[in-house]
Amino acid sequence: MSISPKKYTLMVAILTSFLTPFVATSINIALPSIGEEFTANAIVLGWIPTIYLLSLAVCLVPIGRIADIYGRKRFFTYGIILFTLSSLLATLSFSVNMLIFFRILQGLSCAMIFG
């Protein structure tokens, strides 16, 4: 059974609409383990979920305007690719600073997806 392009597009849109907010909130469960692994204090750990939402909020309007100029489909596709790569690299982080950097990239890519 083949999937029509409209159904495929709908499935991708639903998946990304679920996945990006899920990543924003699911990190909170892992914060105690991350703190033990990287011996990070509560202030640094607080930046891990916050920086994602901050970078998303800061980048959403400018990226939306740029996506209007260069094409929303292109930005949506690049956003999914960047989100996947930054999520993978965030799991491979070996320091808190590296994790925070990849969370910034996740927020930027989420803005590209929703922009």
Image (cartoon, grey):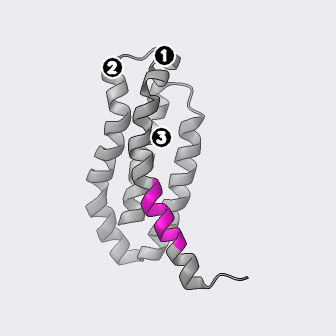
Q: CA distance from mark 3 to mark 2?
A: 19 Å
Q: Which mark is residue 42?
A: 2
Numbered-mark total: 3
The quadrant holding residue 7 is: bottom right
Q: CA distance from mark 1 to mark 3?
A: 19 Å
Task: Name the residue beneath numbered marker 3.
Answer: 102
Q: Position of residue 98 (x, y in %)?
A: 49, 31
Q: Which mark is residue 36?
A: 1
Check if mark 2's residue and mark 1's residue have beta carbons within 8 Å: no
Asked if the magenta segment contains residue 16, the reply would be yes
**Main SS of the magenta segment?**
helix
Residue located at (37% from left, 64% from top): 114
Q: In the drawing, does residue 59 fall left or right of residue 35?
A: left
Amino acid type at image mark 1: Glu
Mark 2 or mark 1, earlier in chain: 1
Q: Position of residue 115 (x, y in %)?
A: 35, 66
Residue located at (36% from left, 43% from top): 52
Residue located at (48% from left, 33% from top): 99
Which class describes the residues within 10 Å of circle 1: few (<14), some (14-19), or many (20+)?
few
Q: Is residue 55 above or below residue 47?
A: below
Amino acid type at image mark 3: Phe
Q: Is residue 50 above or below residue 39?
A: below
Q: Provide the secondary structure element on which disc 2 rests.
A: helix
Q: In the drawing, does residue 55 fall left or right of residue 76?
A: left
Amino acid type at image mark 2: Ala
Mark 1 or mark 3, earlier in chain: 1
Q: Provide the secondary structure element on which disc 1 rests.
A: helix
Residue located at (43% from left, 49% from top): 22
- Residue bounds of the magenta highlight: 11-19
